[in-house]
Image: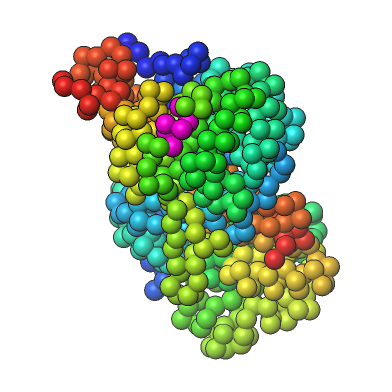
Amino acid sequence: MAKLIRDFKVLSNNRISQDYFILELMSPDPLLKIMPGQFIQVRIDGSRETFLRRPFSVHDADYERNIIKILVQIAGKGTETMSKLIPGELLNIIYPLGKPFSEPDSGEKILLAGGGSGIAPLLFLAKHLSQQKINPDILLGFKNKDKIIENEEFANYGRVYVTTEDGSLGIKGMVTQHPVLLEGKYDRIYCCGPEAMMKEVTSLAKSRNIFCEVSLENLMACGIGICLCCIVKTTRGNICTCTEGPVLNANELIW
Amino acid sequence: MVNLSFKIGNLNFKNPVITASGTCGYGIELEDFISLEKLGGIIVKGMTLKPREGNPYPRMVETPSGMLNSVGLQNPGIDYFEKNIYPKLSGLDTNIMINVNGSTIDEYVELAQRINNLKKIPAIELNISCPNVKMGGMAFGTNPVSAREVIKSVRNVYSGILIVKLSPNVTSIEEFARIAEEEGADAVSLVNTLLGMAIDVKKMKPSLSTVTGGLSGPAIKPVALRMVWQAAKAVNIPVIGIGGIMNSNDALEFIMAGATAIQVGTALFIDPLTPYKIISGIEQFLEEKGFTDYSILIGCINKNF
């Protein structure tokens, strides 16, 4: 699939919580098709601390307006710099990268399980599924009720379940303790979140014999398969997360 | 029009911009962005006789103006390359070169012999400077006796263009450049990465699974430039400059220090178009100065003009 390097224009930068913001980025030419789970590599200029590009899952794509949205968690110098971008500024982007979530068969019952910045590709996936008349169940984990983001947006596409670590909203505990994951009847689970959560979700899915895909967040340098830095150990050997993933079948991961 | 072509031995290069081993995959991965045929050449991922899994994750960490890697020569081996990748590359009108690695001299020799039979691979880059493998690699390239032995042994069996990739982790780069020249190398390329490390303070652990790794990027450019300058004065064979080259200005610095050609490495991770930008930047510089051939710039800081 073709990949492009383009200067996208920042249309808006919307702080949605203390730690998260959403960037709307407009392509200078017709947006290439992007599938849920694919990502972009963003170049952040102006600091010796942000030498490499940063990968971000696509949060939404609008082909009429040629816009990509990304949900960004402020986690370090690069994302801190990005949080200060103002409309009109340009951001150099390589896209679309990586392999997307697989398409479900019609009539399958789907669960999306996400935590932290891992919800970024899942909203795009939920929208994509709903366009095919599939309304997934969506399980989201947060630290507490003040950290909850985007649950209303998810509610447009399926039934939302929430866990908070302190029980201030939804079920108290982690995503992996929620009854929908422990007992719900699903044909497919799509998961993205902190590694510990993904490991537990995949082992739950395996034990319950449910097809499960996870979107990995390995550290990347190039994002295009030339540096071999972002590898993950699988039944196929060490493979690049950026080109063979970031979405991988849980059964092939050796964690 | 300005002339950017040059020769190593009898091998012609269209221009002095080559992509560095380990930073351009097998070239194919870059075809979304650039035409490989516009480059002076590409040096494909470090190869070994047998497949190698490389080191465990994490094998990369960003550092100020650079990065550390400890990939550890992950590659599918010569058999796989010959069967599945070579056919895709052999029709290209540019110099496809292979970076050659081994844990023992016999492995280097056997791999060089295999490549000698691949008609569309005109040159090898003998890697005696990889800092990320337990056996071989830098151990050969930081000891004058073993460096000489491995270069001599490979030269005996390899009839193509032999480039020796040198380690910066030595006291005297001149000594190793001279050894390469004495043993019949057609060129030397330098520098490979500098041995370094980083610690994740929050986790109280090394950032890399291997603790140490190879530092690359603009952070090492002044060191690399100094070593290229020293090596170029020490030998009469061409020197290929490598180390943190991000743009045509950097490339011109290496050429003026004495490099006949340069390799673009880590910059490809950030901007895969860097080789194009360097080629056109060198052309523009020559036109502005009124020169018709870039060779006038090679080592020019040592001349009086």
Task: Pinpoint residue A36: horizontal percent, then vertical percent.
Answer: 61, 53
Based on the displayed image, in which of its 4 quarters is residue A163 positioned?
A: bottom right
Residue B25 can be seen, yes or no: no
Task: Pinpoint residue B305: horizontal percent, then vertical percent.
Answer: 16, 20
Task: Pinpoint residue B208: horizontal percent, then vertical percent.
Answer: 52, 61
Residue B75 appears left or right of A91: right
Based on the displayed image, in which of its 4 quarters is residue A234 positioned?
A: bottom right
Q: Which residue is depicted at the point 71% across and 44% down?
A: B51
Magenta-tinted stretch: B176-181
Residue B116 appears left or right of B83: left
Instruction: Check the image and name the residue furthest to the front.
Output: B145
Give B127 or A249, whichever is nearer the viewer: B127
Give B284 or B59, whichever is nearer the viewer: B59
Instruction: Check the image and name the residue furthest to the left.
Output: B305
Based on the displayed image, in which of its 4 quarters is residue B29 positioned?
A: top right
Residue A30 appears left or right of A225: left
Q: Which residue is depicted at the point 55% across and 61% down?
A: B210
Tell me, yes or no, whether the highlighted magenta stretch contains residue B179: yes
Q: Which residue is depicted at the point 44% across and 16% down?
A: B7
- How would you classify the magenta stretch by its main secondary structure? helix
Give A57 or B40, whichever is nearer the viewer: B40
- Indicate the quadrant containing the N terminus of chain B: top left, top right, bottom left or bottom right: top left
Q: Is residue B225 above or below residue A142?
A: above
